[in-house]
């Protein structure tokens, strides 16, 4: 007969039985220990706000030491790799040592879940830094995102990491928000498709994904980080929730993280409506809810809905929070709260069961587990050739050609001027959550990036396509420095050149230490610092100018776009960004990226996105402000040309639970191979509530040789027209709809109408949220 201990370690038994057996043997203190975490941070970070890598990190120093904190067990080890620079061998050994201490400290020998950031790759020294999430959106390529996430997960798992704090599913609402670079874009279907691919890729490698930030974070007032959110229930249900719902239902995601920003006065970390009723009861989520860093404590100190840290912990736990990150503060006294009658033990048990379930599924409670369990010999290469090739492909497919007045690709000009701060600073290629910008830049010398990188200037100079060109460089201005003394030199260099390439944009950082990234919000959409003046000065020389933007958000380009001979938009393209950009400029790479966010025309009057109703668009006689973008959502040019034709629809009428197939042919009418992101949009002629002018319902990236043609068929279920009606329930409403297949949200060349007939149908939980697509001959 097996002993009790052998029962919960028995891998042949169902997970729920193993968890129940272990839980029954645990004391209150041991249970509470599973809901806490510990972060070993540098001393200066705990007392110096200038070095924060999480919001207000310096205000939460001075807790118990690690040995004291783990005496009853521990839920999570926070960022053993992603806190200070450690080479992979050191990092792996450090994590193993911490796990050994956790195992030895509790009588059951239960290890902790080790979590790390992984938004642009495994956030540790020497790991491949992939393009930022906004670049994934520009690729319009779920298969590529899936492959990238699989590589990220494999690298994390072999180092002993169990959970990644990605992806970000926030739908962009205001381009001024600093974390736009962390999002996938401004359309919930695009975000949902690519986030789902990431979740499946990461979890397919054995690492739990974590959806961020549930919910509404990106809709903060004024684009300010952590600011209040004023969203109605319809906007939440129809725009904010869908990507999260798909990742829960279809991706079976294993973890969700709350949002910092309160919604109409309700703090998500204490919201039973969000964390239990919506997430678990409606969508069937069975994983763990983890707190965004210190968000439970913020219920007391910032939201002021709890009169103490302990009260904040009880609010969060009762709402459905399972684990406090990154340190145990508000969950410190849960055992005492049960004894005092302030917390039902059943609520504590529920959260502990979820954490133990995750540990069982990760193999942490197996009898043969050791901290070296996933080590693969001496394989500590986190920047492999395969990773690099994948990072290059992602970068190349994310670069967007916005304007080309027969100047690109470059044809070996005799004298080429390269101007601007982005040309020689590879850090501009990396997102805020890359290890280089997030951590390493605080420790290393200016030219040390912790991973091999090539600047745009170096890549151009090394390009065989420019072997006959004399390339001269002038910085002009810095990213934020208001000194404009270098503009005169840049102008002189431009005047002496046949063509000028002006590289401007962002340098990501944290809490005001960058021009993009967490806490780096802006008042308007002017290029940072004096970069706009630099662009103007070069354009005024009359030299044909190519504007290259390497940014984390879209900036207003209307004041000089029509004078630029070419415009290339790059959204933080990662470690291979320099060669990828050079490849596009020289024609080695045919650009295929599409805008996941619009490019505004003017600086201040267009903070919204393409998902607006008729009154949110331009209307003569109503307002003197024109909110239309310079370049719309989904837009992007190529070095070849495409034609979308022969749109067909399988039926002109369908039932309220029916399906219609919408198809067209896409043909490469140019002279070279290329790829086109074919996009399907729907619009509702009339409805009981005000709806967007049109919305993305499906897309497919189609690769075509010169002269080649393929069919693209979208299968559109009536649920894809559903919305939250006047009564507050989701409905499919009979009426006429227009289906458009084109190359952007404003390309309306091919369209057809169909009608949904019958009675209004209330749509229950589990609706159809995808649009299957078939690419044929």
Image (cartoon, rainbow, N blue to C red):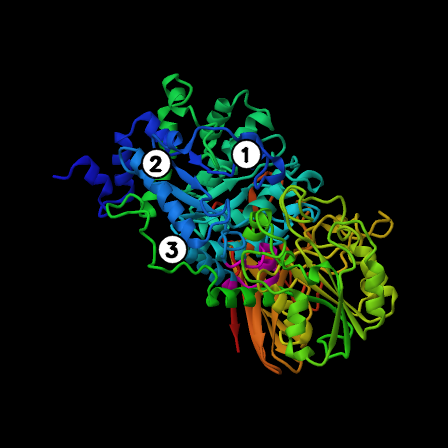
Residue 353's disc number? 2
Residue 158's disc number? 3
Q: Return the residue nearer the eye: 675 or 523.
A: 523
**Residue 621 relative to residue 305: left or right:** right
Q: Are marks 1 and 3 in contact (CB under 8 Å)?
A: no
Q: Return the residue nearer the eye: 369 or 336.
A: 369
Relative to 290, residue 745 above or below? below
- Residue 51: x, y in percent? 60, 40
Q: What segment carries the magenta color? A: 128-144
Mark nearest the camera among 1 and 2 is: 1
- Residue 734: x, y in percent? 60, 52
The structure residue drawn at horizontal position 85% and vertical position 61%, both measured from the top left corner, is 488
Q: Are marks 3 and 2 in contact (CB under 8 Å)?
A: no
- Give the Cα distance between marks 3 and 2: 26 Å
Q: How busy is the neighbourhood of tag 1: few (under 14 within 10 Å), some, or many (20 plus)?
A: some
Closer to the N terminus: mark 1 or mark 3?
1
Q: Return the residue nearer the eye: 663 or 584.
A: 584
Secondary structure under badge 1? loop
Mark nearest the camera among 3 and 2 is: 3
- Residue 3: x, y in percent? 16, 36
Closer to the N terminus: mark 3 or mark 2?
3
**Residue 768 relative to residue 349: left or right:** right
Give the image quarter of residue 400.
bottom right
Residue 394 appears in the figure: yes
Closer to the N terminus: mark 1 or mark 2?
1
- Residue 725: x, y in percent? 61, 43
The stretch drawn in magenta includes residue 670: no
Residue 46's disc number? 1
- Give the Cα distance between marks 1 and 3: 30 Å
């Amino acid at each position: 007969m097996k002993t009790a201990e052998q029962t919960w370690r028995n891998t042949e038994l169902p997970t729920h039985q193993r968890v129940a057996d272990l839980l029954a043997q645990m004391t209150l203190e041991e249970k509470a220990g599973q809901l806490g975490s510990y972060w070993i941070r540098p001393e200066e970070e705990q007392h110096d706000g200038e070095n924060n890598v999480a919001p207000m990190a310096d205000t939460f120093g001075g807790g118990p030491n690690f040995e004291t904190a783990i005496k009853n067990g521990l839920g999570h080890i926070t960022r053993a790799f992603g806190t200070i620079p450690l080479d992979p061998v050191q990092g792996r050994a450090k994590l193993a040592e911490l796990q050994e201490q956790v195992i030895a400290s509790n009588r059951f020998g239960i290890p902790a879940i080790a979590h790390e950031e992984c938004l642009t790759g495994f956030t540790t020294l020497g790991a491949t830094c992939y393009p930022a999430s906004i670049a994934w959106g520009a690729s319009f390529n779920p298969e590529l995102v899936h492959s990238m996430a699989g590589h990220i997960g494999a690298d994390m798992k072999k180092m002993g990491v169990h959970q990644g704090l990605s992806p970000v599913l926030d739908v962009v609402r205001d381009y001024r928000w600093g974390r736009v670079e962390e999002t996938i874009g401004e359309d919930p279907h695009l975000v949902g498709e690519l986030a789902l691919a990431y979740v499946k890729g990461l979890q397919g490698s054995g690492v739990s994904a974590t959806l961020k930030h549930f919910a509404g974070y990106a809709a903060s007032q004024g684009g300010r980080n952590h600011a209040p959110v004023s969203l109605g229930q319809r906007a939440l249900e129809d725009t904010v929730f869908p990507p999260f719902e798909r990742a829960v239902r279809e991706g079976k995601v294993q973890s969700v993280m709350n949002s910092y920003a309160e919604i109409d006065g309700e703090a998500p970390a204490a919201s039973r409506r969000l964390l239990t009723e919506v997430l678990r009861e409606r969508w069937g989520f069975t994983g763990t809810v983890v707190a965004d860093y210190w968000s439970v404590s913020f219920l007391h100190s910032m939201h002021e809905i709890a009169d103490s840290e302990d009260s904040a912990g009880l609010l969060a736990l009762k709402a459905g929070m399972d684990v406090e990150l990154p340190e145990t503060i508000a969950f410190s006294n849960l055992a005492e709260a049960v004894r005092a009658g302030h917390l039902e033990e059943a609520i504590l048990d529920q959260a502990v069961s979820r954490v133990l379930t995750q540990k069982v599924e990760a193999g942490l409670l197996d009898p043969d587990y050791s901290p070296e369990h996933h080590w693969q010999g001496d394989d500590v290469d986190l920047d492999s050739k395969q990773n690099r090739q994948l990072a290059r492909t992602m970068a190349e497919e994310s670069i967007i050609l916005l304007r080309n007045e027969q100047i690109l690709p470059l044809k070996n000009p005799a004298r080429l001027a390269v101007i601007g701060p982005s040309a020689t600073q590879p850090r501009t290629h990396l997102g805020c959550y890359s290890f280089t910008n997030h951590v390493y830049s605080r420790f290393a010398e200016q030219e040390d990036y912790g991973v091999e990188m090539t600047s745009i200037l170096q890549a151009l100079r090394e390009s065989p396509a420019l072997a006959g060109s004399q390339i001269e460089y002038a910085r002009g201005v810095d990213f934020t420095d208001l000194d404009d003394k270098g503009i005169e030199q840049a102008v002189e260099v431009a005047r002496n050149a046949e063509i000028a390439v002006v590289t401007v944009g962002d340098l990501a950082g944290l809490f005001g230490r960058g021009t993009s990234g967490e806490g780096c919000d802006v008042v308007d959409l002017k290029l940072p610092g004096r970069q706009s003046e630099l662009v103007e000065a070069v354009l005024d020389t009359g030299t044909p100018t190519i504007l290259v933007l390497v940014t984390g958000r879209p900036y207003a380009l209307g004041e000089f776009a029509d004078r630029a001979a070419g415009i290339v938009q790059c959204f933080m393209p990662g470690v291979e960004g320099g060669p990828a950009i050079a490849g596009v400029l020289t024609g080695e790479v045919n650009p295929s990226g599409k805008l996941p966010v619009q490019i505004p025309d003017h600086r201040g009057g267009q903070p919204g996105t393409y998902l607006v109703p008729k009154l949110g668009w331009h209307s003569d006689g109503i307002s003197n402000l024109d909110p239309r973008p310079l370049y719309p959502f989904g837009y992007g040019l190529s070095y070849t040309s495409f034609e979308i034709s022969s749109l067909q629809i399988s039926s002109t009428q369908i039932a309220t639970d029916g399906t219609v197939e919408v198809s067209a042919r896409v043909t490469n009418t140019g002279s070279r191979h290329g790829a086109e992101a074919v996009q399907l949009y729907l619009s509702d002629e009339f409805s009981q509530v005000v709806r967007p002018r049109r919305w993305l319902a499906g897309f497919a990236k189609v690769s075509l040789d010169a002269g080649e043609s393929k069919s693209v068929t979208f299968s559109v279920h009536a649920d894809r027209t559903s919305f939250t009606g006047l009564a507050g329930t989701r409905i499919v409403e009979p009426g006429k709809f227009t289906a458009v297949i084109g190359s952007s949200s404003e390309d309306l060349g091919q369209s057809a109408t169909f009608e949904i007939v019958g009675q209004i149908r209330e749509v229950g939980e589990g609706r159809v949220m995808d649009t299957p697509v078939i690419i044929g001959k």
